[in-house]
Image (tube, helix red, strand yellow):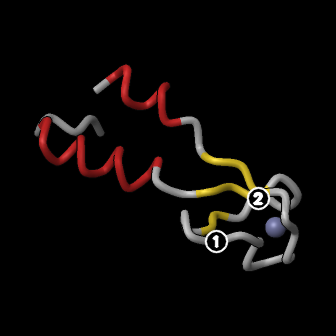
Amino acid sequence: MPITDPIKKQIAQRKRLYLKICFKCGARNSMAATRCRKCHSKYLRQKNRTLGIKKA
Ligand SMILES: [Zn+2]
């Protein structure tokens, strides 16, 4: 189901992209997190935001 409202889409994308992903288990963590909340790994990556913004 496509989101037609561009403002809602922007908010959704920002929320979706504003997080860190654990390299080990793939869990989503907050931007403030330094360790994974699930496996406590330090290997977190930022979600690639440039890709999401390009489409918006
Ligand atoms: Zn993890």
Residue placed at 63% from the left, 63% from the top?
28
Residue placed at 22% from the left, 39% from the top?
3
Residue placed at 46% from the left, 54% from the top?
18
- Marks 1 and 2, the one that precedes in the sequence: 2
CB of mark 2 near ligand 1 (< 8 Å): yes
Q: Position of residue 4 (x, y in %)?
A: 14, 34
Residue placed at 34% from the left, 22% from the top?
55
User: Mark 1 is on which residue type?
Assistant: Ala
Query: Badge 2: how crowded within 10 Å, few (<14), some, or many (20+)?
Result: many
Specify the farthest residue to the top: 54
Q: Quadrant of residue 52?
A: top left
Label 1 vs label 2, nearer the camera: 1
User: Mark 2 is on which residue type?
Assistant: Cys
SS type, badge 2: strand
Q: Position of residue 22 (x, y in %)?
A: 76, 58
The residue to which callout 1 is attached is 33
Quadrant location of ligand 1?
bottom right
Query: Badge 1: how crowded within 10 Å, few (<14), some, or many (20+)?
Result: some
The N terminus sits in image quarter:
top left
Is 53 positioned to the left or the right of 18 in the image? left
Is 50 positioned to the left or the right of 5 in the image? right
Residue 22 tag number: 2
Residues at badges 1 and 2 in contact (C-beta under 8 Å)? no
